[in-house]
Image: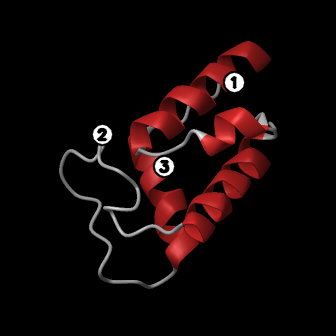
Amino acid sequence: MAELTIDDLKGFLLRAVGEDESIDLSGDILDTQLTDLGFDSLAVIATTSSLEQHFQIKLEDADASNIETPRDYLDIFNRELAQAA
């Protein structure tokens, strides 16, 4: 079964913002607001879209709009991946 890990997620998040060196994803970021980590709504949308394409799933709009922290990404995507298996 496919699973989204925090390390995988960090890679997707960083690709969404390109070479922005002000983004620091080290330490315990699971419950930190994405906006506090330096991600605007466009970066969140880009990350969500990339993850959907990578895992070949489509989130419900309500789930996608509830993503505010890295933990939200992990919980929502891993739940969807488990259901798709």
Q: Earlier in the sequence, mark 2 or mark 3?
A: 3
How far apart in space, not on screen, are marks 3 and 1 (Cα)? 15 Å
How far apart in space, not on screen, are marks 2 and 3 (Cα)? 14 Å
- In the image, taking residue 8 as reference, residue 83 lies left or right, namely right
**Residue 85 visible:** no
| Circle nearer the viewer, 2 or 3 | 2
Relative height, residue 48 to residue 37 (above, below): above
Label 3 residue SS? helix
How far apart in space, not on screen, are marks 2 and 1 (Cα)? 20 Å
In the picture of the structure, the residue carrying the numbered disc 1 is: 80
Q: Position of residue 52 (x, y in %)?
A: 74, 46
Q: Residue at x 20, y 44 (%)?
A: 28
In the rendered image, which quarter is residue 69 located in?
A: top left
Q: Earlier in the sequence, mark 2 or mark 1?
A: 2
Q: Nearer the viewer, residue 60 or 50?
A: 60
In the rendered image, which quarter is residue 47 located in?
A: bottom right
In the picture of the structure, the residue carrying the numbered disc 3 is: 9
Q: Position of residue 61 (x, y in %)?
A: 76, 39
Q: Quadrant of the N terminus?
A: top right
Marking on residue 4: none
Q: Earlier in the sequence, mark 3 or mark 1?
A: 3
Label 2 residue SS? loop
